[in-house]
Amino acid sequence: MTEFHSLANLIKRLEVATTRLEDLAMSSSSASAVAASSTSPSSPKAITHTSNETPDIVLKHDEAIKSHLDIFYALSEEIGEPVSQQAQLVKQAIQAERDILFISTLSQKPDMSSSTFMKLLEPIQKSLSGIVEIKEKNRPNPFFNHLSVVAEGIPALGWFTTAPTPVPFIREMKESAQFYSNRVIKEFKEKDPKHVEWTRAFAGFIESLAVFVKSEFPTGLTWNAQGEKPEYFIGKSPSSGSTTTTTTTSSSAAAAATTAAPSGGAPPPPPPPPPPPPAAVSGEDKSSQQQSTGAAAVFAEINKGTSVTANLRKVDKSEMTHKNPTLRAGSVVTATPGSPPHKRQGPPTPNKPDKYTLKKAAKTSLEANKWVVENHEGNHEVVIEETAINQAVYIFNCKNSTIRIKGKVNAITMDSCTKCGIAVDSTVSTVDIVNCKSFALQVFNVVPTIAVDKCDSGEIYLSKECLGVEILSAKSTSLNVLVPEDIEAEESEYKEVPVPEQFKTTIVDGKLVTITVEHAG
């Protein structure tokens, strides 16, 4: 019996030892596998980017614009300074735009409002600023129109920032350049035809860029979702032929490689014990943490029953108006002793006199395609002469001033002005007058539409050519239109015609019919 018992114990010990050996073998093999996968050069998580080869999309871009650019560069050199100097900056700007296109094939899409994207744009912004600077420095130069053609059209290279409509943006820049191109053609058509070819080459370059973008990126530039972070490409030019190789390994594999035990060693240590349970919260603390707020607190008070009125004060009979005639006579209940006195509201703070108000500096400047005229007071010699058909004029916060606008502009707006007058030659679209008092508008040639909104006391003087104008008025009073009495005469007196302010509305066949009210006598 004793021998049988010893044999049973021996078999049991052998089974325990066999189980431990099997566990050790399994743990060592798994650790070896993890270490091998983390050090293997052919890991599936490795991402390699090689920029030696130019992507097909960049080659298509180069092919689309190359023919026109070659002509443009060659003719710019023949024309000479400063056109050739500006053409060199055009070449740099196109290279910077090409780099952005190259980076988009290797990088993830950056946030357009982030500092990373702004740093990626720095090369092209620097080139575009230099192109505009050359134009501004050479205004008296006989080739100023040439410089304006390039300065107005080259912003089309920023098409990748205007998703989802890049093609209309490029065409708009082309139309802006066309205005100055027509001037160059008009001036050099008979004198030197190569200047005409120069303008056509530049216009052809912008049009070929628009065709390329419409074919490849109709809704905006696409980026590589599996590519590098955009920060990696700051200050780099991928199209220069540099090679960048990066390998990415998952953090879980790296952690397994560092913690795995060598083959044949001891098994890995057991995981750490779970964190201790949270400390017990006393009844008072628990109730204070679960106090209700908002609507829940209101319903909690209501559910208290009769105790909800425990904190209310009993009203004395001397304070009841229905039992005290003296209170009803005065319509005022006197405050009880000990209650806080009622605060009387003081008089409103008066506005500062005009002489203590800080006045802003007067301003007359051209910002992009818009003339800005602001804060003039008592100035009747504000004249805008160098105008263009694609420019707008914005007049704001002027008092007792006169603004003369020569030439033909796109549109004019006068906002929040008092006792101001405008003298206009012609506009392409409208003249808007908003929130103005005691204004005067004189048209020397043609204006198609005049819109007056929220104005008081205005006079509009029309020329013989402007009698077909449309005048739109809303929420305005004391408007008068002055037209020539004799259209045939060269010089004629003006006849004043008031704009109606009173209307009569009737219902005819279920529809509202509104006519002006006419007073006889």
Image (cartoon, rainbow, N blue to C red):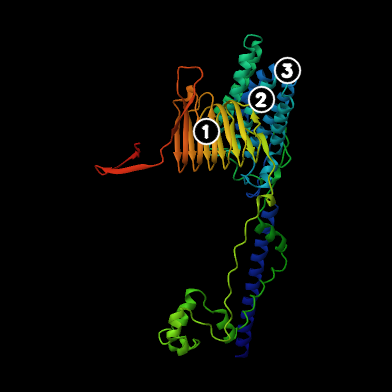
The front one of 448 and 464 is: 464
- How many numbered marks are there? 3
Where does the C terminus fall, quadrant-wise?
A: top left
**Closer mark to the observer between disc 3 and disc 2:** 2
The first of marks 3 and 2 along the sequence is 3
**Closer mark to the observer between disc 1 and disc 2:** 1
Query: The residue tagged with tag 1: helix, strand or loop?
Result: strand
Q: CA distance from mark 3 to mark 1?
A: 44 Å
The residue that label 3 is drawn on is: 77
The first of marks 3 and 1 along the sequence is 3
The front one of 428 and 439 is: 439
Q: Percent x, y for residue 213? A: 56, 31
Q: Quadrant of residue 217?
A: top right
> Residue at 72% of width from left, 28% of height from top?
136
Q: Is residue 245 visible?
A: no
Q: Quadrant of residue 85?
A: top right
Kind of residue sitting beneath label 3: Glu
Kind of residue sitting beneath label 2: Ser
Query: The residue tagged with tag 3: helix, strand or loop?
Result: helix
The first of marks 1 and 2 along the sequence is 2
> Residue at 34% of width from left, 37% of height from top?
520
Using the image, tell me which numbered label, if any, was put on residue 148.
2
Looking at the image, residue 448 sits to the left or right of residue 364; the answer is left
Q: Is residue 423 visible?
A: yes
Q: Residues within 10 Å of mark 3 (few under 14, many from 20)?
A: some
